[in-house]
Amino acid sequence: MSVIYNNLTRELKKEVIHHTIFISKAIELNADSYMPYITAVGKESKSRISLISADGTVLYDSFAPAEKLENHGDRPEIKSAMSSGTGEATRLSDTLGEKTYYYAVKLSNGNILRVAATSKSILGLIRSAVPWIVIIAIAILVLAVIIARVITDLIIKPINKLNLNDPLSNRTYEELAPLLSRLEKQNQKILAQVKKLTSQQHEFEYITGNMKEGLVFLGENGTILFENNSAKRILGDAVGKSYLELHRDVQYIKAIDSALAGKALRVKMNKYSKMYELSANPVDGKSNAYAAVLFIVDITAKENVEKLRREFSANVSHELKTPLTSIMGYAEIIENGIAKQEDIPDFANSIYGEASRLLALIEDIIKLSRMDERDLDQEFAEVDLSELCESVINNLSEKAKTKNIKIDYSGNTSIVYGIKPILYEVIYNLCDNAIIYNKDNGSIKITLLVENNKTKLSVSDTGIGIAPHHHDRIFERFYRVDKSHSKETGGTGLGLAIVKHAAMLHRAEIALKSQEAKGTTITIAFPNN
């Protein structure tokens, strides 16, 4: 706009100067009658034409009556024309936004001819151009937005189609090559990390999934975050739910509440006839809250062993105390001379019997203790069970005759891998029990049979039998179906316990069939190695 303004100003000045020169030449040619000419030109011309005398009086003006105009003698262009023959001046109107250019020429008669032309000032030019500038700016802005969108879409389109999983396979701008290379490296790094995490997760799932113990992770708000398979079998599946929905046992809730409060607690819980130990431990979380880890261990076997140990200790104490009490009683009577002379042999016989019973009990306890040690591998050898059966029958034949009990044996040579003294004790105890708990004139049948890659030893009797509710317990130490009868027979209560432990030592299976008043059959199946 500055350039345009300067060009317009320059052209305006040239036009005014030429116009002034043309009019002055015409006046000089018509020196006697030029007023009609000036008047005619003034009416047709858009420029302002003025004729001013040498003293500054306005003689003619094409825009206003001359008599109403003030003296122009002080105007710059007039002064300059009076002194040098020509003069010019430019005056601005800030209110109108216009600029007027004046050019004056001194005529031969001393008057001054002045021509003026008005054009917009640069400020006025800007004002008049503002609406167009705004329209053009808006149009350019709209066009720029449209073009920018189109160009942006064209630029972004190949970027949006990038295969980020395989960055180096993309064909796009060279400028993106460094970025794609970095993406490829990052992908490889992420892939390696994911592979490592997946491997660790699979390892964790495998380990926890095959744990016999239950494992539960709880969040700070008591939500179940994770359960392994054992925990699900024991408590149920409630991942994502509150721990209160998992189980309602008082001890379980007490343990979890304690861990979430920041204090470890170990409790016992009874469920499905099994005993579990719950160990709840807090895990520091955000702020002052705690998460928790619950560890569940099946201690049923441990509790049962502990119970059996207590019962065994009590039974041993009782069984040892009873014969010792009798021995001490008889001995004290004899020592104090209270016993009659003829009763002393009976008392001595009783002392001998109780001592024998005590010795048998101690021997059975020693046998059981030795088998519990399980350090007998070096004593295993091939043993002929048929030979042991015949030896036991010979040793118990006299005892069987006292009750008129017939013993039948059937079987061929049967070799098993085991400890000969212990296997002898097994057969002896089974046959001895069959005699003790048999009826007079009864029978015992001993059978050896090789079947399904197993050697089966069966001892059957026609005795008093065992009620069904005793079947699960008769192999326990010191357990007696009929305690009074057992005392009469002199049994220690450890015979079948020795049989059970010996079978376990030889990886054999025990089967019991018995009916009250019809007899009992116990079968031991030895694996053929």
Image (cartoon, rainbow, N blue to C red):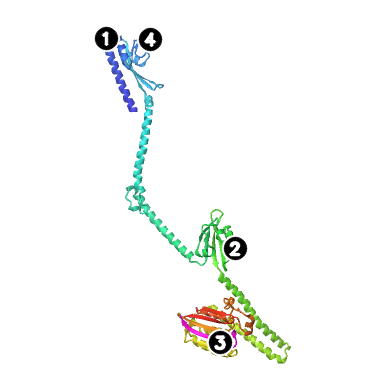
Q: Badge 3 local density, few (<14 within 10 Å), some, or many (20+)? A: many
Q: Amino acid at mark 4?
A: Glu
Q: Is residue 476 above or below residue 102?
A: below
| Label 1–label 4 contact, CB within 8 A | no
Locate residue 96: give its quadrant.
Answer: top left
For the magenta stretch, what is the residue range?
434-451
Q: CA distance from mark 1 to mark 2?
A: 135 Å
| Label 1–label 3 contact, CB within 8 A | no
Q: CA distance from mark 1 to mark 4?
A: 24 Å
Mark 3 or mark 2: whose residue is earlier in sequence: 2
Q: Residue at x 36, y 33 (%)?
A: 139
| Residue 67, label in figure | 4
Badge 1 element: loop
Mark 3 or mark 4: whose residue is earlier in sequence: 4
User: Residue beneath label 1, please?
Assistant: 30
Q: Residue at x 28, y 13 (%)?
A: 24
Q: Say whether residue 368 is visible.
A: no
Residue 158 point in image, percent of width and height: 34, 47
Mark 1 or mark 3: whose residue is earlier in sequence: 1
| Residue 373 painted magenta | no
Q: Amino acid at mark 1?
A: Asn
User: Residue beneath label 2, please?
Assistant: 251
Q: CA distance from mark 3 to mark 4?
A: 173 Å
Report the mark closest to the observer, 4 or 2. 2
Q: Amino acid at mark 2?
A: Gln
Q: Residue furthest bottom?
A: 342
